[in-house]
Image (spheres, grey):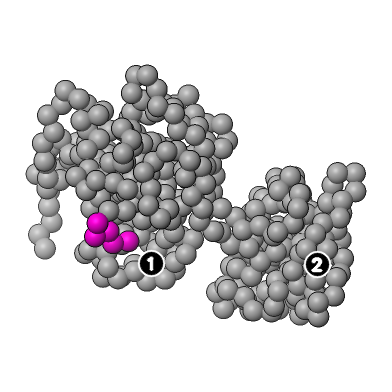
Amino acid sequence: MIETDALIIGAGPVGLFQAFQLGLQEISAHIVDALPHIGGQCVELYADKPIYDIPGVPVCTGRELIASLQTQLAPFKTPVHLGQLVSTVEHQSDGRLLVTTSTGTTFLAKTLFIAAGVGAFQARMPNVEGLAAHIDKQVHLGLPENAAWEDRDVLVLGDSESALSAAIALAQQADKPKSLSLMHRRNVFVAEPGTIATFKALVDTGQIRFVAGQVTGMQEANGRISAAQYVDAEGTQQILPVDELLVLMGLSPKLGPLAHWGLDMERRQIKVNTEAFATDQHCIFAVGDINTYPGKKKLILCGFHECVLAAFGATSIVFPEKRVLLEYTTTSSRLHRLLGVDISAPKENP
């Protein structure tokens, strides 16, 4: 069990900035995210698209914003637990919260910050009965490292950058699969032009087979997937041998277990007060797109503002005897010490 002052659900921009603001209050924190990487919507939805409304930053991409926030957070060495969904939250007799994730990780936290954006991103799956039972066996939601599939029939599902990149990587590795196919309902892809060009070149040379169709079922033998049933572009049922299935059909946000924690909600968002962005449950705060209040605007900038007040609100819980003062990073020696700033270093003349 991991004991911490604060647990943050969500490793997007607001979750990262929440950890930074907690660090300034000397509140230790851990971050949990359902995705296998840091970044949330910034990386999933607009990693390389420009953002123009971050104060003091005329333009940056989603990926660049996340990188800057990680650099800013670095002095606090905040642990991040990826690829796991928070499943249960239980109030304890001592006022703390017992939090369990889908991987069995448990936390005992004095405060909980929900910065889950529009929900936990989860992989879109084909509507095929029994497919989920094969996840991490023959069904993969990402390309495993060093996938040794040279004697396997591999099928990739999806039209995204990640789907095409996975097919390209398998086609170009030394120990190529026995057969390699990528299936999508039509020959149109949502990926970078260079990735699409490389993919089509490998299709033209026969290293990847493109299949226009949609999976409708799976055939099994001895408890293992042996083939995919699919409907082709003409509406005809077809069979394709499959040993390994890569499902890269994109992600969709879902509230998941959060919807059953008893929080006061309105239209799939958590209601909070605007003094400290606390929920109706003691020790639980909600910041960013997951919350709602009169006048709410779903902007990253607004989420950052909420993080500041939520961090101040948490100090009375984590440090009930401590007097909380407003300090400025420009002048506070305490904050300089926390951030590792050397104020004695000579400054260069502009």
Residue under pointer 1: 61
The numbered mark at residue 305 is none
Q: Nearer the viewer, mark 2 or mark 1?
A: 2
Q: Which residues are magenta?
A: 294-298
Let me know if residue 151 appears in the view. Answer: no
Q: Quadrant of residue 64?
A: bottom left
- Badge 1 marks a residue whose secondary structure is strand
Find out whether residue 61 is within the magenta segment: no
Query: Amino acid under label 1?
Result: Thr
Residue 299 on image: x %, y %: 31, 62
Q: Quadrant of residue 278?
A: top left
From the viewer's perspective, is 46 left or right of 291? right
Residue under pointer 2: 230
Residue 38 on image: x %, y %: 45, 50
From the viewer's perspective, is 143 left or right of 310? right
Q: Quadrant of residue 177?
A: bottom right
Residue 151 on image: x %, y %: 85, 55
Q: What secondary structure is the stretch in magenta mostly built from?
A: loop
Residue at the location (57% across, 73% down)? 191
The Cα–Cα distance between marks 2 and 1, rounded to whole angstroms, is 38 Å
Query: Amino acid under label 2?
Result: Tyr
Residue at the location (58% across, 68% down)? 161
From the viewer's perspective, is 349 left or right of 280? left
- Badge 2 marks a residue whose secondary structure is strand
Mark 1 nearby-residue class (10 Å; few <14, some 14–19, many ≥20): some
Let me know if residue 140 appears in the view. Answer: yes
2 or 1: tag closer to the N-terminus: 1
Residue 176 on image: x %, y %: 78, 60
In front: 334, or 96? 96
Residue at the location (45% across, 38% down)? 261
Residue at the location (86% across, 55% down)? 219
